[in-house]
Image (cartoon, grey):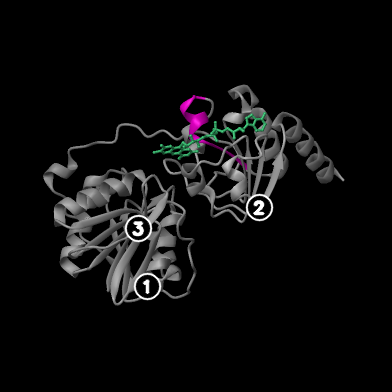
């Protein structure tokens, strides 16, 4: 197998999920190379060997400054054609979903997306992905090469395996049609505290809170624990809390040490985004709520009574 892993980066840092996919590719074996495309990204290449790449291809060009997909499709397609990679892996993001789709069209290649695992079975690469609203996992394969795959957010943690990668600079050649789009503005949502993907502790609020004004309860508890606030789709759809905090099938996948679910029923579409947490604590007034089937610790009761008391207790402990 000869695998190319497309590495995404933001603000001068390689994205954690991309490095996780690279580590997985190295575990699967064969020749593993990485591609970094951007402008002024040379320093990033030095970090990549530690995560399992024997070689890093560097496409460093001002034309790649904006995070637009088409120029990246050109660079990746050139590289795959020129070096005959049989597998190209991406950690799924808004940008890589576009790049992978463009690459599939350009190379007439098969793309499997939303994968939550990759294995080798009898010498064949097999992907695992959820189906039927995340209620079952199915094995998926490819009929031809190159095999393209997008891996779901939060699936693989970066594994440091040591080592250095050889760096090769690429000549960037872009198609005329790939340079037509310009990035006019890029805005970042301001947020306080750790992001839910990086947080060790998450306190998530659901519809059981009763209204957006009660999210303060969840925020105070998260603050007392030094954690981040997450939410369910029901509250995001109701406009109570921002989408960036949504956990689940159509939101983010998280795996903190501690996940406290407050007023959350535990629907399967929520579960798939948080079941990798080390310890799940649920506070719900309905003892038959599905979340109690997979919580490590369940508290049956009214969140309005329990959460403020828990927050106060934690504050006292911290102060002592
Ligand atoms: C295709 C698809 C994709 C989806 N993607 C997602 C996703 O990414 N993420 C996601 O979260 N959902 C997703 N959903 C929606 C999902 O099916 C559920 O509807 C949603 O998770 C429910 O959110 P909730 O638990 O906040 O609300 P509810 O299901 O309404 O649960 C509220 C809970 O609060 C409890 N409660 C009420 N009052 C109190 C109180 N005073 N004290 C304590 N407990 C109380 C209730 O007993 C109840 O269990 C998706 C659905 C579909 C069909």
Residue 7's place in the image compared with 272, above or below, is below
Residue at image point 30% right, 77% down: 122
Residue 175's place in the image compared with 315, above or below, is below
Image coordinates for residue 149, horizontal then vertical, percent:
30, 58
Of residues 189 and 113, the one drawn nearer to the viewer in this rendering: 113
* Left or right of 104 on screen, residue 123: right
Question: Distance of mark 2 from mark 1, alpha carbons?
Answer: 32 Å
* Left or right of 305 on screen, residue 47: left
Q: Which range is magenta?
A: 228-239
Residue at image point 49% right, 67% down: 159
Whether the residue carrying mark 1 lies under 8 Å from ligand 1 is answered with no
User: What secondary structure is marked by label 2?
Assistant: loop
Residue 108 picture quarter: bottom left
Q: Which mark is residue 296?
A: 2
Q: Furthest residue to the right?
A: 320
Whether residue 56 is visible here, answered yes or no, is: no
Q: Furthest residue to the front?
A: 288
Q: Earlier in the sequence, mark 3 or mark 1?
A: 1
Whether the residue carrying mark 3 lies under 8 Å from ligand 1 is answered with no
* Left or right of 295 on screen, residue 42: left
Q: Nearer the viewer, mark 2 or mark 1?
A: 2
Question: Distance of mark 3 from mark 1, alpha carbons?
Answer: 20 Å
Residue at image point 72% right, 29% down: 304
Residue at image point 71% right, 42% down: 299
User: What secondary structure is marked by label 1?
Assistant: helix
Of residues 264 and 290, the one drawn nearer to the viewer in this rendering: 290
Look at mark 3 in the image and give the residue it sits on: 138
Kindly indicate whether the residue at mark 1 contacts the one at mark 2 (C-beta within 8 angstroms): no
Look at mark 1 in the image and give the residue it sits on: 28
Q: Furthest residue to the left?
A: 176
């Amino acid at each position: 197998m000869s695998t190319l892993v497309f590495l995404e980066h933001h603000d001068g840092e390689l994205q954690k999920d991309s490095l996780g996919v690279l580590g997985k590719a190295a575990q699967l074996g064969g020749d593993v190379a990485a591609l970094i495309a951007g402008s002024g990204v040379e320093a990033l290449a030095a970090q990549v060997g530690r995560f399992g790449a024997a070689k890093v291809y560097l496409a460093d060009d001002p034309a790649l400054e904006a995070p637009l997909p088409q120029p990246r499709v050109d660079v990746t397609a050139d590289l795959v054609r020129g070096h005959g990679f049989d597998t190209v892996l991406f950690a799924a993001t808004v940008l890589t979903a576009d790049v992978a789709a463009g690459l599939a069209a350009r190379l007439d290649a098969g793309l499997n997306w939303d994968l939550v695992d990759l294995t080798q079975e009898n010498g064949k690469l097999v992907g695992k992905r959820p189906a039927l609203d995340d209620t079952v996992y199915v094995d998926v394969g490819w009929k031809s090469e190159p095999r393209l795959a997008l891996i779901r957010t939060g699936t693989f943690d970066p594994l440091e395996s040591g080592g250095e990668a050889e760096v090769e600079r690429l000549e960037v050649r872009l198609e005329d049609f790939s340079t037509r789009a310009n990035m006019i503005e890029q805005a970042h949502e301001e947020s306080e505290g750790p992001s839910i993907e990086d947080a060790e502790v998450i306190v998530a609020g659901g519809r059981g809170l009763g209204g957006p004004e009660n999210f303060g309860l969840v925020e105070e508890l998260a603050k007392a624990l030094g954690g981040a606030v997450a939410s369910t789709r029901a509250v995001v759809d109701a406009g109570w809390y921002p989408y960036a905090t949504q956990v689940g099938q159509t939101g983010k996948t998280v795996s903190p040490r501690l996940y406290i679910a407050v007023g959350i029923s535990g629907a399967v579409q929520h579960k798939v985004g948080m079941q990798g947490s080390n310890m799940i604590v649920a506070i719900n007034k309905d003892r038959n709520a599905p979340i109690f089937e997979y919580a490590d610790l369940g508290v049956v009761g009214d969140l309005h009574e329990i959460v403020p008391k828990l927050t106060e207790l934690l504050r006292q402990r911290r102060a002592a």
